[in-house]
Amino acid sequence: MNPGHDPARLCAHAVLVDILHRRLPLDVTLPPRLDGLADARDRRFAHRLALTVLRHRGALRTAAASLLDRPLPARDLRVQVLLECGLAQLLLLDVPDHAAVDSSVALAGPLRLGRYRALVNAVLRRALRERGRLQAMLDAPLSALPDWLAGRWTERFGPDVARDIARALRAEPPLDISVARDPAGWAARLDGAILAGNTVRRPAGSGAGPVADLDGYEDGHEDGGWWVQDAAAALPVRLLPIPDDGLVLDLCAAPGGKTAQLAAAGARVVAVDRSAQRLTRLRENLRRLRLEATIVEADAAAWRNDAPAGAILLDAPCSATGTLRRRPDIAWTKTEADIAALARVQAALLANAAAQLRPGGYLVYAVCSLEAEEGPARIARLLAEDPALERAPVDAPALDRMALGPMAPALTAEGDVQTLPCHLATQGGIDGFFIARIRRRG
């Protein structure tokens, strides 16, 4: 094959430019780009290369800058991405040196960057000579992150924990699956292991390809089907007591993983979300899983149920910085300004959710974020504004039973839960989630 027309590397480059320039989410740009590749090996390599660059981009960008005599103009992002892809192949992937260099130089042609061929060649050949120095740069965990994010985590969690988080984000995560029923049967069918509750984990690297191609995704069996849901994402529902009348309001419910979890547990779920497109996915998931819920298209910051509820789940929109193991693009598409804007949205959602909670009822608030403004700060403000609300603290034994193992490090002094990607490292880690359980006095 002509390396200048290498479809896998062209695909990875296009995905990265979509994310870094056009700010498209990974799950929007990657699937259609991969679908355009006819060869399964090309799809696997393009996927791996794009995610490797995103997971290590901070260090790759610094490494590239150290190899240049003068900085690239800001407008030359496509050249920067080409260099980062080449360095990722040389320093992080099992690509032969000559193939990494030659393919990167040749790729400048179809990318219409021909005038940069000599520069790309010189930078990558210098990288070969200075491999040891560059490898040390990549080995520093926090170097992979944007400076603003590394700084925030260091300030909040301390330098040692921040490095542990960053180290966990560089590894390919396992695939966690929630099942409606029969976890033992599904673990056998999916070559996974049973975790706490109805979660089955397939180890990292246990086969590439679309999730929908796995056994039983579409047809399930008489005991129901399954859906992808990180083990940490399953905790909010497990922490929410289902009231005697069975009614649970699931606010910001789409695409429906927690709705399915509640319905499978026997709750009468009212699932509310403002996005018609995401609710279509929720309906499809419930249909596939043979589960039922009442679905409402509305803004959860304003919508009110007919009567107060005894159980409310609010899985609020957030920066999702706790999910970078699976979504490394978020580090490069989100900013601190986004976090401040999302915190205001969360405050409105929390206030409206709490107003619908009947005396003695429970509200569980969850965000897949590691940012204080989106977690503990939101709960502190809510409790300060409504003295009829109180925390219903989570205790360590209960959390251990609900999760994968000893989870004491995830408990805060106030009784909230803050899981980190470095928690339960020997079992494959988990996503970062903040979860608070609130009760209305009565």
Image (spheres, rainbow, N blue to C red):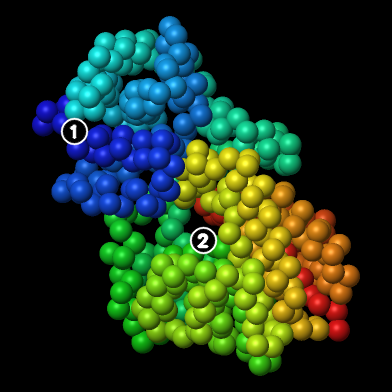
Density class for disc 2 (Cα within 10 Å; few <14, some 14-19, many ≥20) is many
Give coordinates of residue 226: x percent, y percent: 41, 73
The relative height of residue 220 versus residue 378 in the rendered view (above or below) is below
Q: Is residue 99 left or right of residue 192?
A: left
Q: SS class of the residue under badge 1?
A: loop
Residue occupying the point 48% across, 67% down: 275
- Which residue is most to the left? 1
The residue sitting at the top extreme is 69
76 up-or-down from 349: above or below:
above
| Amino acid under disc 1 | Asp
Residue where numbered disc 2 is placed = 230
Q: Dividing the picture into quarters, in which one does residue 403 lie?
A: bottom right
Residue 236 image position (x, y, % from top left): 63, 68
In this view, the residue in front, 225 or 183, is 225
Please indicate, yes or no, whether residue 362 appears anywhere in the rendered image.
no
Q: Nearer the viewer, mark 2 or mark 1?
A: 1
Q: Residue at x 41, y 77 (%)?
A: 283
At 79% across and 63% down in the image, what residue appears? 382
Give the amino acid type for the residue marked by disc 2 in the picture: Asp
Q: Is residue 359 left or right of residue 160?
A: right
Of the pair 50 and 189, the residue shown nearer to us: 50
Q: Which residue is mark 1?
A: 6
- Element carrying mark 2: loop
Q: Is residue 23 visible?
A: yes
Q: Position of residue 66 (x, y in %)?
A: 47, 13
Q: Residue at x 24, y 28 (%)?
A: 111
